[in-house]
Amino acid sequence: MKSVEIAKGIYDVGVNDWNIMDFHGHSTHRGSSYNAFLIVDEKIALIDAVKKEFADELIENISRIIDPSKIDMVISNHTEMDHSGGLARVMHRIGENKPLYCSKMGQKNLSLHYPQNWNYHPVENGETLSLGKHTLSFMETRMLHWPDSMFTYLKEEKILFSSDAFGQHYAGFEKFDDMMTDDIMPHAKKYFANILLPYAPLILKLLDQVAAMGLDIRMICPDHGIIWRKDPGKIIDAYARWGRQDTLRKAVVVYDTMWHSTERMADAIAAGLNAEGVAVAPMSLKKHDRSDIMMEVLDARAVVVGSPTMNNGLFPTLGDFLTYMKGLKPKNKIGAAFGSYGWSGESVKLISQELEAMKFELVDSGVRVQYVPDQAALDACFALGQKIGRAI
Amino acid sequence: MDKYVCTVCGYVYDPALGDPDSGIKPGTKFEDIPDDWQCPVCGASKSDFEKE
């Protein structure tokens, strides 16, 4: 991808990863991008360094603007390898002794990834750095979403380089929000639901802090996807909403099935929810990826979980999903369990225990059906759906 | 009572507030928290905390 001048003398020199469809277990149906930014001033700074496989492309992008050896310093906002994997190549090309600015935790974490003894300059929260006409200031954003995460703010242009925050896994030639419709929002929402949700309370704190600082933000440059320049407030407002975990009159029915019995139960529960005016879709774990389901869970008030009993336990995909959801710490949820079984039927109890451990409010003790649901069983499922619907 | 800070994520344990979500009542001294307690923000161990 050719670099894009995002403001005078400031370029996105990042790359598109068109074909990545699975980002460490998170489905990325539209690929992703690893953005990196070059600021050409009296001193030249590079912010972040893409994934290792794309390091040559990054260097090529920089070479079209300046000789890479002229770069005076690198700023690493985040240690994760999709933003630091190219560092070894970059430092080698520009000079191993050039200063590398990062947070204190960034220095610690980078040195746990890379053996090179780089010229680290750990920065304090609020520290500033002049490039000549431009001044950078650094803001520690620990656990958004790694201990090393930080933001870099360019005062004169009012640009926030926000690392992974406000990002979206989206590869495209469109580089700005004004080149796209609202179609970009589900990508941003999915990113939040799968990466930032466990740290939602910290997001709210950060947004308050940014508001209190009176930080004027004209453009937000995340490390993935498009840049927010038409209306940065839109993504900030969305982060406030998602951070508060506001819910809609909405439910997710997530399940797997062996012989379609739990599936028929899921459909009946969804119909019952719908009868109460709740937006709902049953989602089979055979067809839907865990990260797509989490995007729907983010603003759903109810999560209804179904599993057949297999060998006295949960169906394995449910173990996967429940483990994943638990780690993401969703709040403000109600729920219930359901499932078919042959002879023992532990699944409903096991799911209920898991949901309680996640601090879900259980609306009902759940519905269990032996072998195949008859009409009475399906009616009980429909009634469960209605009961949950009324509790929303 | 002293406050303790998580060296990984910066979370501050305030004994006055405790950590009720993990069953640590307000008024619990850091020293009296069980050793298997974890940082409520990042999950780091109790041994990763330092006096503020």
Image (cartoon, helix red, strand yellow):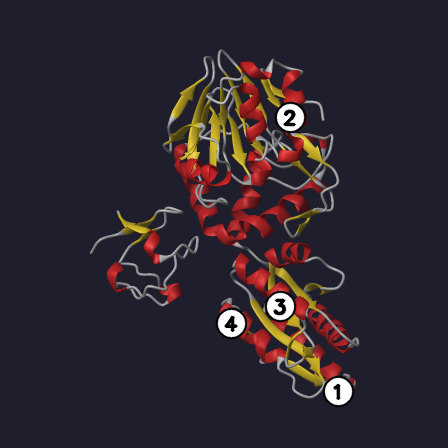
**Residues indicated by labels 2 and 1 sit on the same polypeptide chain:** yes
Against A169, is A132 above or below? above
What is the number of the mark on residue A356?
A: 4
Q: Which SS class for mark 1? A: helix
For marks 1 and 4, give the one nearer the viewer.
4
Question: Which residue is under mark 1?
Answer: A376
Cβ–Cβ under 8 Å for marks 3 and 4: no
**Residues indicated by labels 1 and 3 sit on the same polypeptide chain:** yes
Residue A332: x, y in percent? 52, 62
Q: Which SS class for mark 4? A: helix
Q: CA distance from mark 1 to mark 3?
A: 29 Å
- Rendering quarter of residue A83: top right
Q: CA distance from mark 2 to mark 4?
A: 47 Å
Q: Which SS class for mark 3? A: helix
Residue A361: x, y in percent? 52, 71
Give the residue displayed 76% in from the left and 83% down from the top.
A373
Question: Which residue is under mark 3?
Answer: A319
- The first of marks 3 and 4 along the sequence is 3
Q: CA distance from mark 2 to mark 3?
A: 40 Å
What is the number of the mark on residue A320?
A: none
Q: CA distance from mark 2 to mark 1?
A: 63 Å
Q: Badge 4: how crowded within 10 Å, few (<14), some, or many (20+)?
A: some
- The first of marks 1 and 3 along the sequence is 3
Q: CA distance from mark 3 to mark 4?
A: 15 Å
Against A191, is A265 above or below? below
Give the residue displayed 41% in from the left and 21% down from the top.
A129
Chain assignment, label 4: A
Chain assignment, label 1: A
Residue A173: x, y in percent? 74, 30
| Res. B29 visible in picture | no
